[in-house]
Image (tube, rainbow, N blue to C red):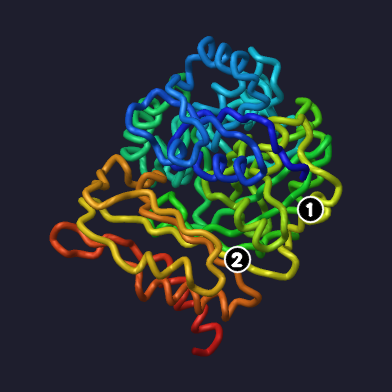
Amino acid sequence: MKALKGRKILILGATASCVHVTKFAKSMGAFVYVTDNVADYGPAKKHADEPVMISTADVEALTKFVRDNSVDGVMTGPGEFNIQNAIELCSSTGLPFYCNREQWKVCQDKRNFKDFCKRFGLPGVPEYSVNEQLEKRDFPVIVKPVDGYSSKGINICWNEEEYKMAKEVALAASKSGKILVEKYVNNGGVTIDAKYVAIDGDYYLEAMGDRYVLNGGLITAISFYPSKYLDCFMAQVHPYVKKAFSSIGLKNGAFFFQAIPDDENIYIYEMGLRVSGGMIYNMTEATSGNNTLKMLIHYSVTGEMCEESDIKNIDVNFKGKIASTLSFPLRIGTIASFEGFDSIPAMKGVIDLTIYYEIGNTILQKHVNTLDQLFARVMVSADDEESLFDTLQAIRTIASVKNIKGEEMIIWDTYDRIYAKYKAEKGG
């Protein structure tokens, strides 16, 4: 990609999710403003060339700021609230943004997206009518708000009583007051994460991994890339992607599918018209050499994603490497101490470590089964499975988060089960 020296970028949001946006934009040569209306500087503002005190929702004030300061582009992180604000601001100022209001509505509303899938042959999860009387044989089902995010308001139901409660929770989490009821595929907790980048009307699958959820939960404990279901996905999903997204005029940008394997079938249950909070762009840059977030930053200023040489780096097979993202889900409680994390960045193959909490922060019941339950994420790459698990197990050995009673808060069950299976298969 071409350097952005001398260009100005305004980033909406100063939270941790915008730190990479800020750092990447600066590394590409741009002068970076970061804005929100919070008095205490968030982490992204600490990296800005110039912090700004304007609410990210105040489009009128931001439009004036953009024009008064000759800002060349507007960007934000994966947060849906600020993506919508960026869409409105770019519409007001005429600056490029990778999607518009109509495209966002199709992809982010779960009801709209399920209908979109049906129209273009993308395989969606079987669903039930919200008003339908479910029989015992219909369970388990999963209930979710049509406009939710970060796994909030989503519950798995095994019987009628849980189903009634889950509908109330989902409705409370939905701004539109609408929910979905879908078949829950009980496959041992494996889901699929597929990342796409759109460049001038072509759609490239850049990463696909298998995610293993927390035992009895919904959030991902660990994921592995590339996916063992890649061939099935390429046969059942990929052939329909171009026709589907061309129909809504999405020529440039980033999006991802979340899907679930059921025997030989792949069912898509959600998508995001954005980079994911999992920061897989760091993984693809370390393994294949492409970084979609940098492409989106470049597009926000130039109206172009990248150059031909950048496209050639895209490889869903990571040029022979493998990778993993290990999460650190916590039990309910107040964080009194954590240790071992200072040593992780220097370990072999570690790409990135992001810590979300500090000493004194509390994990509450409302955080359980949402991304707010995660203390941190670490990303690792390797040339082979043995090297990958060597690093993961080294992390498992030293990482610890304790509550005020001195009890371990990290939930290791899912990782320990997967590691035990790996060792058994290797005869270790």
Whether residue 163 is visible, yes or no, is: yes
Who is closer to the viewer here, 372 or 98?
98
Query: Looking at the image, which is closer to me, 18 or 71?
Result: 71
**Residue at left offset 71%, top offset 38%:** 4
Which residue is the site of mark 1? 235
Q: Is residue 146 visible to the viewer in this orientation of the structure?
A: no
**Number of numbered discs overlaid on the protein picture:** 2
Q: Nearer the viewer, mark 1 or mark 2?
A: 2
Where is residue 68? Give x, y as percent.
59, 14
Determine whether 362 is above or below 129 in the image: below
The residue positioned 70% from the left and 16% from the top of the image is 94
Q: Position of residue 108 (x, y in %)?
A: 58, 30
Q: Is residue 56 above or below residue 294?
A: above
Please identify the residue farthest to the left as the structure is shown: 405
User: Which amino acid is tagged 2?
Assistant: Ala
Name the residue type under label 1: Ala
Left or right: 92, with 129 as reference point: right
Label 2: element kind: strand
**Does residue 170 lie above or below 268 as drawn?**
above
Q: Which residue is mark 2?
A: 323
Residue 334, percent from left and from top: 20, 51
